[in-house]
Amino acid sequence: MKPMNTSDLSHRPPSTVHRRIVALAGGVGGAKLAHGLAQILAPEELTIIVNTGDDFEHLGMYICPDLDTVCYTLGGLANPETGWGRVNETWNAIANVERLGGPAWFRLGDQDIATHLERTRRLKEGQPLSQITKDFCKAWGIQHTILPMSDSPVRTMVDSDEGELAFQEYFVHRQCAPKVRGFRFDGVEGAESVVGAKEAIDAADAIVICPSNPWVSVDPILKVIKKIARPVVAVSPIIGGKAVKGPAAKMYTELGIEPSALAVANHYRNILAGFVLDNADLSMENDVKKLNIETLVTDTFMNNFTDRIRLAEDVLHFIGSL
Ligand code: GDP
């Protein structure tokens, strides 16, 4: 991926499309499109609601991987090579934890640890995650609104051939090796969305489901939000039958569904007004249309900063045409 710097922002396209958008995002895939949308939409036009189902406590710290990925990306702080973690990171703390025989399977950089330490301190004082996130965003110079999906803990549990695993145990520690059978979102029934989320959704011209993992990044958000009375457009995270990154395609296969853009459209079919699929999946466009969903076929692979803006513009124009 091309390294990003703030001078890139001078290439912002003219803001020709004015829309009120709520974006639903997981980590890396979601953050990339959210970042593109943030280059076009004014701060009051974009709210990003982020999955917290993969949050967990580790080494005494409360860690929010998706939330931090979105914040670091929009704040220009993300590592452009990995898409997660901080740019110019050092790894002294975790190296010393390892040297002392502690758990080092979850890679935490020194700057990143500062985020988790301060968030944990404030949570222990009783402050809500949404307020802490708001304050962190301000400190990082992020103007668009980023909301965790809920202030109460929701924990994604992976039902696998090796029993039920906490999400990060499956995702990072076991590197997605166990075969999935299903998912459970512990705590989701009682979880409310945070202050401002419902209001942003009700005021939105459209909801954009970013190209994030449908099973473990987007479904938890949809379960917390419960009802969306606005048009919803999703961007496929599956291109040519494969996930760009991560286990989304593997999950579809293990659940007995052939991974494809069509499978993703089917996944969301009850809520979708529009679906964005990649040029590589043009042959599936008609099948998606048969689900009574409008389609846009375009280049959905975001390899660099320009790609993010281009896809965001395409999505906004598509929304305008619905
Ligand atoms: P995670 O929590 O970091 O795994 O992140 P997400 O759930 O947001 O993203 C994972 C999904 O994003 C995977 O299914 C990828 O296929 C998808 N993804 C990542 N980069 C891109 C991209 O550039 N374009 C598209 N269409 N999908 C992407």
Image (cartoon, grey):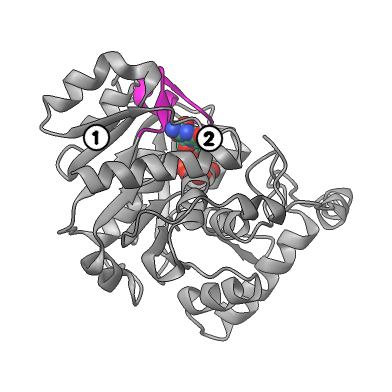
Q: Which residues are magenta?
A: 236-254
| Location of residue 214 (image quadrant) | top left
Residue most toward the bottom? 125
Evaluate if marks 2 and 1 touch, with contact meaning CB atoms under 8 Å apart: no
Q: Secondary structure at mark 2?
A: loop
Asked if 155 appears above or below 307 in the picture, the reply is below
- Residue to which mark 2 is pinned: 302
In-image side of 80 versus 44 (left or right): right
- Residue to which mark 1 is pinned: 267
Q: Nearer the viewer, residue 13 or 91?
A: 13
Q: Dot 2, crowdedness within 10 Å: few (<14), some or many (≥20)?
A: some
- Amino acid type at mark 2: Met
Q: Dot 1, crowdedness within 10 Å: few (<14), some or many (≥20)?
A: some
> Does the closest atom of ligand 1 sit within 8 Å of the Cβ of label 2?
yes
| Location of residue 173 (image quadrant) | top right
Q: Is residue 269 shown in magenta?
A: no
Q: What residue do we see at 75% from left, 51% from top?
A: 87
Q: What residue do we see at 25% from left, 55% from top?
A: 206
